[in-house]
Image: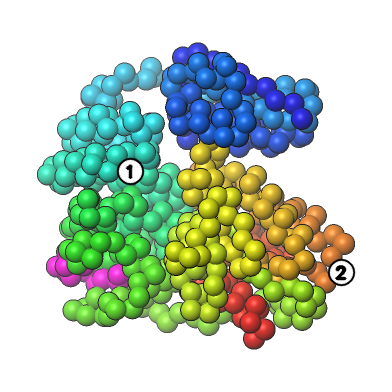
């Protein structure tokens, strides 16, 4: 195996762009891994943990571009580097063909006098001043960056609320504003259902189910995963609720979050009740103590939230053709459930749905005694959120890059004790261009020589037919590879439990 590291001085690039370039270059034949990232201290630690640290990398600064390539041959290393350079050249060419970039937010605001929205994706330690500047320019902000100190988040959100503005984030990767999908979001129909959510893949699952079953979305406002902590006080969740209440197109409000600090949740729910909208509150994983009251419906899964907003009953699951035959033919050695998730909230929903019937180990476990440390490889039932920080330091998110999930899928498919595997596929802008093709190829390869057909693979595709990847096309590819498709993530989870219990 060949390893090459290149440091290019003063070649700062957008981190999201570098993730995409890393993924594209990693698809080069005979290439195991490509990491294109900035020479920040946190990225250096990642490279050191991966055994990739060299003197040149140690000397790099946060403005330097670091490229690490691991491949089978020198020729493959060279081909991957050529791909990185071609992608960087394409970015530079597009930039030079356009008007010279503004050198500050003030200059950008002057050039676009009607603009009212800024998207910020910078290393977290550098983002605070730019967010404050954008707010002072009267701009709503979507903050993709993470690693923002909690005290800074609270102060910036208080500043935004004082100006009547939205600060979505930190670590906000999904939003839909006026029908425009931002960052990792899906193309859904317009309608009268608005969302205020502390969950990116939660927004994606609920909005896609609303679209799939005939409804539409006015806006989906992400607030970042820490907004309901005591230190932040639900500042942006309340601001999002007020914003949606003032929107004439919004008639229904869906609140999505894991349960936060009790006093913060009480404040948020009071704001929702005062909004004048029909409210569906989904506190994912709540213990059921919060019941419907004062015109507010309280549900505990993403599936329930979507159908309650649509005014429909949750449909009964449709068992795919051939699944029962597959399970009946499995070896009696197969006993365990495994889940490989790119959507963290989808993984958490599965754990919650099955919490009373299976003890499932996980890196996002509901019960402390079931929590597994990195690399999160359980000996029995196990579900892994591959999008957690321990898996994404120095590498693209699994919604963008399937490499790590394909490795884990091969391991679980080869394990003679695994009975059923749960997979999610999250589509939309920014996601992998054709994830089902890569997963289908991996499944075809893994099933060779397995007399009993191997583990039953249950999949849910979170997306719409209007997405760049097209939901139906992705489902057809998976189905042809022997996966069994379910309309919702929760239905796939319940079917997996029935398979393990022998009651399907």
* Magenta-span inclusion, residue 359: no
Marks 1 and 2, how far apart at CA: 49 Å
Q: Nearer the viewer, residue 195 or 1?
A: 1
Residue extending furthest toward the front:
369
Q: Is residue 279 magenta?
A: yes
Q: Secondary structure at mark 1?
A: loop
Q: Residue at x 55, y 75 (%)?
A: 358
| Residue 32 locus on image (x, y percent) | 71, 36
Residue at the farthest bottom position: 503
Magenta region: which residues? 268-282
Q: For residue 451, which numbered disc appears in the image?
A: 2
Task: Say above or below: 141 vs 459.
Answer: above
Q: Is residue 234 visible?
A: yes
Label number found at residue 170: 1
Q: Is residue 116 visible?
A: no
Quadrant that contains the C terminus: bottom right
Q: x, y percentage for residue 384? A: 56, 58
Give the residue at x 72% y 55%: 411
Q: Secondary structure at mark 2?
A: loop
Q: Residue at x 12, y 44 (%)?
A: 162
């Amino acid at each position: 195996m060949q390893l090459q590291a290149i440091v290019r001085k003063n070649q700062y690039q957008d981190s999201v762009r570098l993730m995409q370039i890393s993924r594209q270059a990693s698809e080069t034949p005979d290439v195991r891994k490509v990491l294109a990232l900035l020479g920040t201290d946190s990225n250096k630690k990642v490279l050191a943990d991966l055994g990739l640290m060299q003197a040149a990398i140690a000397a790099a600064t946060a403005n330097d571009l670091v490229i690490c390539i691991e491949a089978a041959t020198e020729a493959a290393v060279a081909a991957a580097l050529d791909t990185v350079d071609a992608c960087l050249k394409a970015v530079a060419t597009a930039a030079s063909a356009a008007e010279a970039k503004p050198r500050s937010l003030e200059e950008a605001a002057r050039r676009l006098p009607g603009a009212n929205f800024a998207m910020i994706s910078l290393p977290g330690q550098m983002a605070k001043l730019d967010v404050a500047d954008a707010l002072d320019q009267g701009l709503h902000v979507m903050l993709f960056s993470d690693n923002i100190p909690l005290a800074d988040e609270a102060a910036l959100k208080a500043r935004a609320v004082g100006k009547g503005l939205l600060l979505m984030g930190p670590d906000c990767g999904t939003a839909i504003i006026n029908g425009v999908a931002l960052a990792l979001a899906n193309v859904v129909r317009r309608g009268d259902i608005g969302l205020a959510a502390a969950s990116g893949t939660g927004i994606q699952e609920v909005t896609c189910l609303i679209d799939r079953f005939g409804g539409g979305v006015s806006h989906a406002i992400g607030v970042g995963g820490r907004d309901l902590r005591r230190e932040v006080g639900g500042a942006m969740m309340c601001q999002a609720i007020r914003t949606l209440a003032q929107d004439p197109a919004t008639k229904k409000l869906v609140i999505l979050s894991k349960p936060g600090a009790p006093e913060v949740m009480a404040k948020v729910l009071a704001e929702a009740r005062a909004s004048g909208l029909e409210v569906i509150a989904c506190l994912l994983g709540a213990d059921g103590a919060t019941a419907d009251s004062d015109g507010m419906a309280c549900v505990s899964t993403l599936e329930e939230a979507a159908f309650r907003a649509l005014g429909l009953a949750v449909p009964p699951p449709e068992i795919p053709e051939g699944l029962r035959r597959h399970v009946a033919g499995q070896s009696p050695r197969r006993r365990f459930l495994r889940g490989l998730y790119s959507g963290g909230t989808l993984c958490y929903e599965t754990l919650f749905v099955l919490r009373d019937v299976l003890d499932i180990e996980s890196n996002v476990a509901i019960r402390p005694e079931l929590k597994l440390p990195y690399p999160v490889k359980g000996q029995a039932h196990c579900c892994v959120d591959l999008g957690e920080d321990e898996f994404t330091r120095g590498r693209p998110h699994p919604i963008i890059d399937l490499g790590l999930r394909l490795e884990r899928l091969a391991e679980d498919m080869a394990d003679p004790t695994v009975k059923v595997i749960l997979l999610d596929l999250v589509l939309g802008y920014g996601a992998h261009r054709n994830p089902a093709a890569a997963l289908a190829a991996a499944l075809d390869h893994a099933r060779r020589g397995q007399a009993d057909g191997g583990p039953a693979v249950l999949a849910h595709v979170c997306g719409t037919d209007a997405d760049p990847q097209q939901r139906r096309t992705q489902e057809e590819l998976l189905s042809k590879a022997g996966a069994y498709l379910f309309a919702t993530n929760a239905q796939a989870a319940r079917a997996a439990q029935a398979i393990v219990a022998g009651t399907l």
